[in-house]
Amino acid sequence: MASSRKITLRSSDGESFEVEEAVAVESQTIKHMIEDDCADNAIPLPNVTSKILAKVIEYCKKHVDASKAEDRVNDEDLKAWDAAFIKVDQVDQATLFDLILAANYLNIKSLLDLTCQTVADMIKGNLFPVRNEWLNFTFSIANRELVLVCLTEWVAHRRLFCS
Amino acid sequence: MGQVPSSASASASPEPSHRGISSSQRLDSLPSLELISSSDEDEVCRGDSGGGGYDYTGDLPDECLAHVFHFLGAGDRKRCSSVCRRWLRVDGESRHRLSLNAHAELLSSLPSIFTRFDAVTKLALRCDRKSVSLGDDALILISLKCRSLTRLKLRGCRELTDLGVATFAQNCTQLRKLSCGSCSFGARAINAVLDHCVNLEELSIKRLRGIHDGAEPIGPGAAAKSLRSICLRELINGQSFGPLLVEARKLSTLKLIRCLGDWDKVLQTIGRSNPGLLEVHLERIQVSDGGLSGIANCKGIETLHVVKVPECSNLGLSSIAENCRQLRKLHIDGWRINRIGDEGLVEVAKHCLQLQELVLIGVSVTHSSLGLIGSNCRKLERLAFCGSDTVSDVEIACIATKCEALKKLCIKNCPVSDVGIESLARGCPNLVKIKVRKCRGVSGQVVELLKEQRGSLVFNLDAGEIEALDDFGVEESAAEFPPANASDVPSSSNERSMLFRAKLGFFAGRNLVACTFRRWSNGENSTNGNL
């Protein structure tokens, strides 16, 4: 029987989360810390708040469970779960981007791919006109000539691409 | 092109440098962009100056933003790069794949392009027929800017000469894949690539006009040891590649399509010297049974396409079958010449028990061989018939009873009727998808019947008479008989290519064969594949 050792993770705001080792090592960062024997006490994660850490743990737990033989979840169901997990109106934008940062820091590839793909999907086909509500940019015209210089190469290159 | 040309010293640095652009002129030609200006790109991205809200992407480190861009296609990335300076920079730094219009005018923009995109490893340069392409100086400049290029695709770059390509090769020694189509350089250029690009794995050459009769031999070069895939298409003197083909001991894929000359000897030599060959594609070349027997010495062959090779017969196919017992995918286009038929397929049934995919176009087969294939080839999953006059209801019934592993069946232009299709209701327990095209005897009723009896089956029926170019890529009228001469040369070709096509003579004309199965079994033709 594999040991279900518990690992304690401490968020930036001091909250402790106890998780099974199998779940914790979904994060390559934590995995290396454990391997390097830095995990006797709680593992401090100064870059991740408790709110985000809770979500990350939820994600990792689901993915670890999904691959276990008894609770075998097929790929489609897992994808559906992922989609629900990341749905933007549940997960507000701030949380979405915090998740990207957390996934990056903790080195959880599948979560990083999921979150970045979500942002990419939001970007797709939505960029012209440049004033874009989702991106929360409100541009103003200041100095057009500097703007030209800024994006001159973009304009010059635009016609050169095949696609 | 008429767009704003960047000066030669253009850079993507945040410093605004006044380049003396006459702003009034340029503003008119721009689409109406309302853009923030700033010399500090961070300020731009914050967007605080409008009361619109917060830009979360500003919190992401560059690598995360680049990771987001990685999920976008080239068009979306192009639009993203116009959002703000930071996105312009991150996109430029993380773009590895670039596809450019290779006109002569590209030269002036190259410095700024490769300053902006400084991590390009895969480059496509395409020039259309009407424009003058970039020349040697442009290619050399590219080679200096992109020293770590791994893939290069050239299309229609007719101004490139041996010298330019040779210099390119000296600078870009990490090249792994080279694909050129409709260019005019010659053997010296290819030899230079083979000498310098020692890690070259894939080489695909189509219509290289500089390799005419009397061209110097090509290969082996240093790259012969690393090449895994060679595809030669529409070459007048493809034989000049002989030394390379024979010395490329690691070759696993060989495709010879419409190249002049007698290929028997080369195939026989390859058979002796390249035991590792896995995939062979012979199309409209001069090969006889002797050549097939020769290549049959590569006993590990898993995929074989013999397409419109009129001199190959059952004898050659038998030779392949007896020797290449690992055969998984077999495509034969017999061009309705009837030199390949039941006899050869019986041999395949006897020896090639690993067969997974069988595609027969213009081949007269009957149940006598198909039954045996069904009984023996227990792994057969995909089966397709096109233009086979002898594949009728009897054959389909036979398949239904014998081919237990069959998942996908495609029938086109065969004398099959509802009776035959009905038999599939009871047979082929693993059948997932049926496609029927241009079989006049098959009606919508039998589709309904089958769907009723086998709920999960996908049945694709189209009895339409007129289909310009269908899934098989076969134009029925042209497929009737092999052309006697170059009579079907397209009228739109210009003089140069007319001459070229006339030389190809017998092999001129449009490419007539592309099987449905290319998609089904995910076999990507290296010349058509993406970078």
Image (spheres, coloured by chain):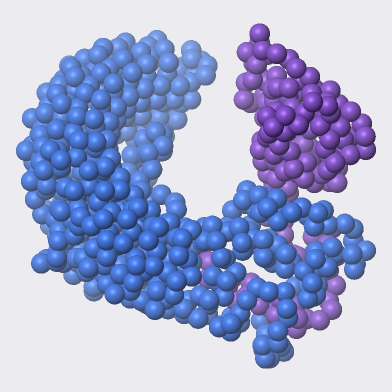
Chain colours: A purple, B blue
The one nearer the camera, A36 or B153, is A36
**In the image, B40: left or right of B202?**
right
Q: Is residue B234 above or below residue B263?
A: below
Quadrant location of residue B335?
Answer: top left
Residue drawn where x is 70% and y is 19% of the image: A65
The one nearer the camera, B374 or B195, is B195
Residue drawn where x is 42% and y is 19% of the image: B431
The one nearer the camera, B447 or B343, is B343
Report if residue B280 is visible in the image: yes
**In the image, A88: left or right of B25?**
right
Q: Is residue A72 above or below residue B191?
A: above
Report if residue B307 is visible in the image: no
**In the image, B78: left or right of A60?**
left
In x, y percent, where is residue B269? 11, 43
In x, y percent, where is residue B160? 32, 73
Residue drawn where x is 58% and y is 82% of the image: B9
Residue drawn where x is 89% and y is 64% of the image: B48
In x, y percent, where is residue B73? 59, 53
In x, y percent, where is residue B471? 38, 41
Q: Is residue B386 above or below residue B344?
A: below
Q: How many marks?
A: 0
The one nearer the camera, B348 or B70, is B70
Quadrant location of residue B317?
Answer: top left
